[in-house]
Each structure stands twice: as structure tokens, then as C-alpha cells.
Image (cartoon, rainbow, N blue to C red):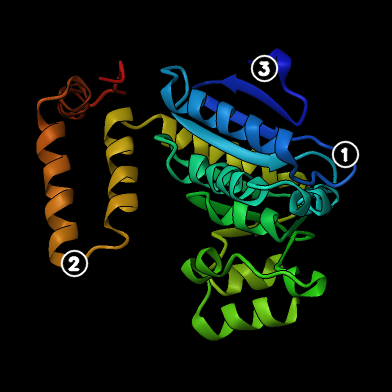
């Protein structure tokens, strides 16, 4: 798969996959990009040699958003918009639904669909030079409200959407949208360090935790916690859990097989 990629690069080391958006000049998202990100994340979700994923951008941009050059032709073909919208949703869903935790290393501008893509990740880290912006209103469009609302307070979400303002790295960290804001040269290393820390834990337990985050987001507290308890019951007899408990008792580092 990696040999055929035009918009992404993928490398795997120490159970950590690093996926880099590499579509010069600004890593804009077109149909080819969306098809590739779906294929890549679906594959990484199933790979036993991957336990955590870092998503970043090549150059000075994370992703400048949708490639608007594709959009004018869509209105000329019956059914084009439903197909386009379905693929756009899939490109975001594949990251959110990936079985493995995904860390966004936002190295620069994350605009429109680029901002939404970062917000689909489990953990967000941003470079000091990085920023989020939702610029749809500047080009007569609308979108991204549901994703923005998950991370921003209501007033801030509306300010972001209505004005197309840029919210820079330090401010994203202050607002609690990003977990850390660091100089650009430290960003990827920090993301990979956190990914390796995640990868050192029980793979089945981490995947169950992500499943719980995804499933319980829209549930009431009682129903959500009941689901989490069902995950704990399922994990109790797994080999990963048995190994984690043996290693804890024996004061050694666990060796996980992923089962």
C-alpha cells in the first residue's frame, strides 16, 4: 500500500506508525488524499505491529483544508455531491474510529478540513507556529461545527466559525484544546514519545479505552459507565491482562502479544 501512496507517507517503528500528509504546497485534501487516508488508517487499525499513530504534516503546514479546485465540477454531475460528502465523512471517521490512539502533531496551519482532521485525533499537540482556523465563511461555505464543538466552549466555537479567525498554538493550549504547545523542532519527537508510551501499555486495554471514549461520548453517564464495565469484563480473561498482572506482581516490564 505504502508504495502506491501519492499524498501520504507512512513509517512504523517500535509499534508506532507515523503518518505524514505530504501533498505540496499546502497539504490540501482532494479525492486522492481522502481515499488514501481511509485506506491507510483502516490498515493501521488492523496491524498488530502498530499500537499508536502520529499524524502530522510535511513542510510548514499541517493541512490547509479542502482542495477547492475540485469543488466547481461537483455541481455539474448528478450525484456528485452525495459521493463527495460521503468520502469526506469517511476521511474523518477513519481517524476517529481507528482502533489505535491517534496523536495529531499540528506542525503549522490547520485550516478548515485540516482543523477538523486534527480534531478527529485522540490527542492534540501543536507547534508554537501552528494554528487552527475555520475559514469556510470566507469562501461562502459552512461546515465543521459538530467537530469544533467537541473541543471548544460554545462561545469560542461560534467565534471560530463565524469570524474565520486564527487561533494559535499557545492559545489552543491555554484553552485546553491542545495537550501541549512546543517549539516546532520538538513537536514530532514529543508526539512519538507519547505514542511509544501508549504502545508500551496493554494493546487490548488501550483499544478498549478508545472504544469506550468513542461509544460513550453520546451516552448518559449510567449507560456509558455500564459499557465501560462490559469492556473491563471482556479484558479480564485476555492474555494481555494476565501478562500485565503477572509483570506487575513480578516487578518487571510486561511483554504483550496483543491478545
Badge 1 marks a residue whose secondary structure is loop
Other-residue count near label 3 (Cα within 10 Å), few / some / many at <14 / 14–19 / ≥20: few
| Position of residue 164 measured from the top left corner of the image (x, y, whole percent) | 75, 75
Q: Residues within 10 Å of mark 1 (few under 14, many from 20)?
A: few
Q: Residues within 10 Å of mark 2 (few under 14, many from 20)?
A: few
> For the view shown, which residue lies furthest in the front direction?
78
Residue at 11 percent of width and 54 percent of height: 226
Q: Secondary structure at mark 2?
A: helix
Q: Nearer the viewer, residue 175 or 247?
A: 175
Residue 221 circle label = 2
What residue is rendered at 65% in x and 38% in y? 34
Mark 3 — residue? 2
| Disc on the earlier residue, 3 or 2 | 3
Residue at label 1?
24
Q: Position of residue 148 (x, y in %)?
A: 55, 68
Residue displayed at 22% across by 27% down: 244
> Can residue 65 be seen from the camera position used here?
no
Asked where in the image residue 136 lies, by quadrant, the reply is bottom right
Q: Residue at x 67, y 47 (%)?
A: 78
Disc tally is 3
Depth check: give the residue in front, 110 or 252: 110
Q: Horizontal and vertical percent for residue 182? A: 69, 56
Q: Which mark is residue 152?
A: none
Specify whether residue 135 is in view: yes
For this orientation, the residue located farthest to the right is 25
What whole-number distance in Å separates the C-alpha atoms at marks 2 and 1? 45 Å
Does label 3 or label 1 sit earlier along the sequence?
Answer: 3
Amino acid at each position: 500500500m505504502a508504495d502506491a501512496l501519492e499524498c501520504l507517507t507512512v513509517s512504523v517503528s517500535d509499534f508506532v506508525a507515523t503518518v505524514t500528509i505530504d501533498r505540496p504546497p499546502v497539504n490540501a485534501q482532494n479525492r486522492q488524499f481522502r481515499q488514501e487516508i481511509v485506506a491507510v488508517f483502516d490498515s493501521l487499525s488492523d496491524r498488530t505491529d502498530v499500537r499508536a499513530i502520529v499524524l502530522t504534516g510535511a513542510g510548514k503546514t499541517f493541512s490547509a483544508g479542502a482542495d477547492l479546485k475540485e469543488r466547481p465540477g461537483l455541481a455539474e454531475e448528478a450525484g456528485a455531491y452525495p459521493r463527495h460528502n460521503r468520502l469526506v465523512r469517511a476521511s474523518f471517521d477513519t481517524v476517529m474510529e481507528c482502533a489505535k490512539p491517534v496523536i495529531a502533531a499540528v506542525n503549522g496551519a490547520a485550516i478548515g478540513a485540516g482543523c477538523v482532521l486534527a480534531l478527529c485525533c485522540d490527542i492534540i499537540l501543536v507547534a508554537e507556529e501552528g494554528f487552527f482556523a475555520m475559514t469556510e465563511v470566507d469562501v461562502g461555505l459552512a461546515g465543521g461545527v459538530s467537530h469544533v464543538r467537541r473541543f471548544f466552549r460554545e462561545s469560542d466555537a461560534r467565534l471560530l466559525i463565524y469570524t474565520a479567525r486564527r487561533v494559535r498554538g499557545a492559545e489552543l493550549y491555554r484553552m485546553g484544546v491542545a495537550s501541549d504547545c512546543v517549539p516546532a523542532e520538538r513537536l514530532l519527537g514529543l508526539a512519538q514519545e507519547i505514542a511509544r508510551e501508549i504502545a508500551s501499555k496493554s494493546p487490548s486495554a488501550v483499544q478498549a479505552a478508545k472504544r469506550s471514549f468513542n461509544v460513550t461520548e453520546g451516552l448518559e453517564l449510567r449507560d456509558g459507565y455500564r459499557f465501560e464495565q462490559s469492556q473491563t469484563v471482556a479484558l479480564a480473561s485476555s492474555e494481555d491482562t494476565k501478562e500485565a498482572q503477572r509483570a506487575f506482581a513480578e516487578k518487571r516490564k510486561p511483554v504483550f502479544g496483543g491478545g
